[in-house]
Amino acid sequence: MENSLRETPVQAQLRAAMDGHPEGEMQTSPEQVQLLALLLKTMNARRVIEVGVFTGYSAMGMAMALPDDGVLVACDLSPDHMAVAQSWWDRAGVSERIEPRIGPAIESLEAMLADGQGGTYDFMYFDADKEAFLEYYELGLKLLRPGGLLTFDNMLKGGRVADPSVTDSSTEATRALAKKLLGDDRVEYSLNPIGDGLALAMLKDQVPA
Ligand SMILES: C[S@@+](CC[C@H](N)C(=O)[O-])C[C@H]1O[C@@H](n2cnc3c(N)ncnc32)[C@H](O)[C@@H]1O
């Protein structure tokens, strides 16, 4: 990390603030956020959705990679998490680029579609309830523009996806998404062992018949 991480002081402070926090493990790893930010820049991304905000570390890093007129729609169930995240985004000077949506993310994504936002997003990062991953995937494909990227965290679940004795609903749902992604002709696909496993799925320009 000493030889690869580029964090601003506020990013480092937010990471340090989660050290010892009972749910601190939920925070996305810094090298992964740095990769997400780099991907956003290579794509000239302007419109991003995050599902799973917690205290705002990954959203902060992604919002910093957007242009001034960029927008990151930040979805989380918990008003408490969102309030903490917003205070950190204020400190980082990125609040203007972040649009918080509190509630079950499926409802938030469906509302965006109903609002005519289908096909308008460049990038999405899913880091919430794994049981909903397949639904997030299908809704995400509808919201994404061709060439846009869907990204999913915790695809390896600390190795548990490869242990057949582990059959909890979250692990089974992660396996189901991995299988879906592998066989889905609508996307280009890559599974990366960074952090806890990051899946990248790019919506093809032309979906095969
Ligand atoms: C792993 S944490 C996100 C970590 C965050 N990306 C970061 O870097 O700090 C997962 C978050 O998803 C939220 N969440 C869980 N189920 C959800 C749902 N159905 N809809 C929206 N958010 C949900 C939780 O409140 C929690 O804040």
Image (cartoon, helix red, strand yellow):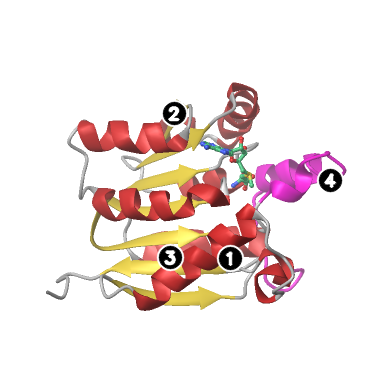
Label 1 beta carbon within 8 A of ligand 1: no
Q: Which mark is residue 19?
A: 4
- Whether residue 201 sits left or right of residue 197 in the image: it is left
Whether the magenta-drawn stretch holds residue 189 is answered as no
The quadrant of the picture occupied by the N terminus is bottom right
Q: Which residue is mark 3?
A: 39
Residue 6 visible, this orientation: no
The quadrant of the picture occupied by the C terminus is bottom left
Which amino acid type is marked by label 3?
Leu
At horizontal 50% and vertical 59% (from top left) the residue drawn is 152
Magenta residues, start to end: 1-27
Question: Mark 2 and 3 residues: CB-CB less than 8 Å, in contact?
Answer: no
Would you place residue 154 above or below residue 76 in this image?
below
Question: Mark 1 and 2 residues: CB-CB less than 8 Å, in contact?
Answer: no
Q: CA distance from mark 4 to mark 3?
A: 27 Å
- Whether residue 168 sits left or right of residue 144 in the image: it is right
Q: Which mark is residue 182?
A: none
Q: CA distance from mark 2 to mark 3?
A: 24 Å
Q: Which residue is mark 2?
A: 101
Whether the magenta-drawn stretch holds residue 12 is answered as yes
Q: Earlier in the sequence, mark 1 or mark 3?
A: 3
Which amino acid type is marked by label 4?
Asp
Residue 186: image quadrant is bottom left
Q: CA distance from mark 1 to mark 4?
A: 23 Å
Q: CA distance from mark 1 to mark 2?
A: 24 Å
Q: CA distance from mark 4 to mark 2?
A: 26 Å
Ligand 1, seen in the image, is in the quarter at: top right
Mark 3 Cα-neighbour bin, 10 Å: few <14, some 14–19, many ≥20: some
Q: Which mark is residue 155?
A: 1
Q: CA distance from mark 1 to mark 3?
A: 18 Å
At horizontal 51% and vertical 75% (from top left) the residue drawn is 191
Mark 2 Cα-neighbour bin, 10 Å: few <14, some 14–19, many ≥20: many
